[in-house]
Each structure stands twice: as structure tokens, then as C-alpha cells.
Image: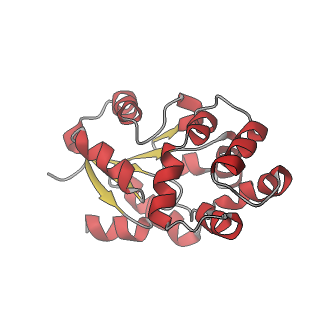
Amino acid sequence: MTPKVLFIDLGGVIVENKTFDFFKTYSVDSLSKEIFSKRWLLSKAVKDFETGKINDYDFSYRIIDEFKLNTSIYNFGLHFPNFIGELTNSTKKILKDLKSKYKLVLVSNSNFIHREIVTKKYNIETYFDFVFFSDVIGLLKPDKEFFEYAIKETKSKKEEIYFFDDSKLNIDSANSIGIKSFRVDGVVEISSLLN
């Protein structure tokens, strides 16, 4: 079945996710990117911050402790806004093209700092029909409730949706509830898969 709705992740798909680079520099542990990604998504501190339950100071303190980072809260806070990359012109062009053919839905684990950057600096809402940030809706991927919420709010049917994310954990979760899902590392891959 050809999809009518595309659920698309933000970090690692639409904009570069630079979180691992920072952690690789300051971590006393040597983690692979895949293990880091899984630990990040399952972290209680991340979940609390990206669902709007704790402030940035508490998040910084807890993450530094949890991941054994050799850095200060100040340094972490200074670099944190830069964990997301730029919205490139080529990505904008692909998103505009996709939006002309499908209902586009942004489904992002986010926080008030990164959300403010992508909404004010990049006007990300203009490229999507619906935008769901975890810190606004209080739900986080890979929790199935996040996907169920987005399905309900967009008045979509699972069989009409394709989901694109860079995290295997998120892909597996969406697949488990009947959403056809693809692990990608950018919108160019989305465009290729759909053509």
C-alpha cells in the first residue's frame, strides 16, 4: 500500500544529531553510537526533560552523572543547543516536495531549547501539516502512546502511515503497533525509499 501520511523524526533525519559527538568527547566510557542511542532513549533524565518534567539545570546535572561525563554543568549547557545541526536548503527542498504528495507529520523527542531553535530559527512548522514535540505533548518515543497520540490527532490510519527515524528502538516500537517503519539517516533516504 502506498502511504498517505509520513511520520518523520527531527534529529538525525531532518537535522544532524550531534549529541553523540559531544558525549564521545567528554565521556569516560567508550560507547558505540548504537549503545549510546539506546541508553539515551531509555534514560530517565532524558525522558523527564524531553517530556517537560524537569528544567535544563536538573537535566544537565543528571545526564553528566548518569553518563559519567568529564565536564561541568556550565560547559554542558553551553554546548547543548548545538546538539542539533542546521536545516539545509536541500532538506527544505525535499520536505516541500514530500509535503506536496503526502500529509507530513513531525514526530520529535525534543525539549524547550531545541524546540525553540527549530521553530524560531528554521520555522519547521511550515514544512509539516502536524508537529508533535515530546516536551509539548508529554509523551516520548519509543513509547507506543506517542505514536497512538499522533495517529489520533492526525486522524490517520496505521496502514496509511510510513514512519522514518534514525533509531532502531523507535522503529521497532512503531512496527510493533502496525506502522510500517524505516530506519534512515536523512531525508534523501526517505525520498529514495518513496520513489
Residue pictured at 70% horizontal, 45% vertical: 116
Residue at the image position 69 percent from the left and 70 percent from the top? 25
Give the camera-side residue of 171 and 98. Answer: 171
Q: Is residue 83 or residue 191 the one in the foreground?
A: 83
Query: Between residues 25 and 167, which one lies in front from this camera angle?
Result: 25
- Expressed as whole percent of the image width and height from the top left, the position of residue 51 reads 58, 33
- Image quarter (top left, top right, bottom left or bottom right) of the C terminus: bottom left
Q: Residue at x 64, y 51 (%)?
A: 118
Q: Is residue 19 visible?
A: yes
Q: How is the image coloured?
A: secondary structure
Whether residue 85 is visible, yes or no, is no
Check the image and report above or below for 65 versus 98. above
Q: Is residue 178 left or right of residue 61?
A: left
Q: Where is residue 42 drawn, in percent x and y?
A: 48, 44
Residue 93, x across and y down, in percent:
49, 66
Q: How many marks?
A: 0
Snapshot quadrant of residue 75: bottom right
147 sits to left or right of 74: left
Which of the 4 image quadrants contains residue 165? bottom left
Residue 45 appears left or right of 179:
right
Q: In the displayed image of the protein, which residue is found farthest to the right?
A: 74
Q: Position of residue 18 (x, y in %)?
A: 62, 65
